[in-house]
Amino acid sequence: MSVEFELAPGRMVGGDHPCFVVAEIGQNHQGDINIAKEMIKKCKEAGADAAKFQKSELNRRFNRAALARAYTSPNAWGPTYGEHKQHLEFSHDQYKELQAYAKQQGIYFFASAMDEKAADFLVDELDVPFVKVASADANNLPYLKHTASKGKPMILSSGMQSMGIMERAVSTVTQNMPGEKRLVVMQCTSTYPLPPADVHLRCINLFKEKFPHAVIGYSGHESGIAISLAAVSLGAKVVERHVTLDKSWKGSDHAASLTFEELKDLCDNIRIVEMALGKPIKEPRPSEQGLFKKLGKSVVAACAIPAGTKLTIDHLSVKAAEPFGIPPDQIYELVGQTVTKAIEEDATIPKEALAA
C-alpha cells in the first residue's frame, strides 16, 4: 500500500483514503473579510475539505525596493506594489477571525506561508493543521529548513522548479522535519490560466517513483475540471484549485479559478472517479449477472448426438443458450468424453449427460 498519514486531525491522506480537496481562496477575497467568509462557507457547501489563504509578512517577503516600485497593472490595488499587496493582506486578528469562522463552518483552515515569519504565525499562533509551501519557495532552502523544523505536515508545490530542485527540496524537508515525515508533493505548473500542453500529469507518476515516502497531489490552474479529474485517476491524493466568486474581478488569479458551481462539480466527480477506480482485482461483478444470464454463452450440440457418442469438436458449438450450461472456455475439455444420453441438435450440452 502507498504511504498514508494524518494530514489534519481526523483526516488521513494517501493509501486508499479519499482525495483531499483544497479550495484556494488565496487573495481572491479582494481584501474584504466579509467576502472571505462568504467564500469559506461556499467552499464547505461545495464539498471541499479545506479552505486555503496566502499569508505574508510583507517586509520579510519583499525587499524595500520591491515594495516601493510603481505598480500600474489593471489589477493594482495601490500605486506601489507594497500598497497593492497590503490591501490584500489580512491582519493577524483577521486571520484568527477567519480561522474561527472556518471552524464554525466545519472546514479545515490553513494558508501558504509565504515567508518564515508567516510560517511562525500560522504554526505558533494559529496552530494550523498543516502548512503549504508555495512553488516560489520550493528552492528556498533556509525557509524549507525553518518551516519543516516546526513538525507540521507540509504540502510542497513544484511550479517553476526542475526535478533536481524538487529532489533537493524533499530531502531538505525530510531531513529537518522531526518525527513522522508527513509530506505531500504537488505536481504544479505556475501559469495562469494553464494551457493543457503545459500540465504534464505524467509527473504524478514520476513523483510517486522518486518520492515513495510522500503523498503525491496536483495543484492546477487550468480552465475547467477535466484535467484535475485525470490527475485523480493517475493517483493524486490531494487536489488544489483556486476559487472565485467572479472570474471577471480584478486580480490575475480569478481567470484561472473555479466558480463554486465548478468546485462542486469537481468534488462530486472526484468521488465518482474514486468509486470507479475500484480495486486491481479482475472478476465478474454482481452487477453483470443480469446481462450474463441473457447473453452469456454455453456449449451446445452442433448436430444431433446419439447416446454413446465420443465427442469431437465437430459435435460442439457455442451459443447464448437456455438453459445455461457448460461455459465455452471448457469446450476443449469435452472433446473425447462420451455422452450417456441422446442430445438434440442446438440443445445445451448438460453436464449430467457426460460419462463420469
Image (cartoon, rainbow, N blue to C red):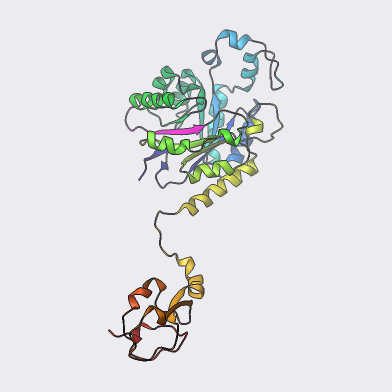
Q: Nearer the viewer, residue 15 or 290?
A: 290
Up/down of 143 relative to 68, above or below: below
Image location (x, y in percent) of residue 246: 69, 35
Q: Quadrant of the C terminus?
A: bottom left
Left or right of residue 256: residue 122: left
Q: Is residue 7 above or below residue 303?
A: above
Whether residue 151 is visible here, answered yes or no, is yes
Q: Nearer the viewer, residue 47 or 281?
A: 281
Specify whether residue 150 is in view.
no
Q: Is residue 186 magenta?
A: yes
Q: Residue furthest left?
A: 356
In depth, the one of 259 and 152 nearer the eye is 259
Residue at 41 percent across and 17 percent down: it is 142
Q: Is residue 189 left or right of residue 164?
A: right
Q: From the viewer's perspective, is 7 left or right of 99?
A: left
Q: Is residue 139 magenta?
A: no
Callout count: 0
Residue 91 position, x and y percent, is 57, 21
Q: Tell me the quarter of the picture where residue 102 sits.
A: top right
Is 350 drawn above or below residue 202 in the view shown? below
Residue 104 rendering spot, x and y as whole percentages: 54, 39
Residue 145 at x, y = what percent? 39, 21
Please give the range of residues in magenta: 178-188
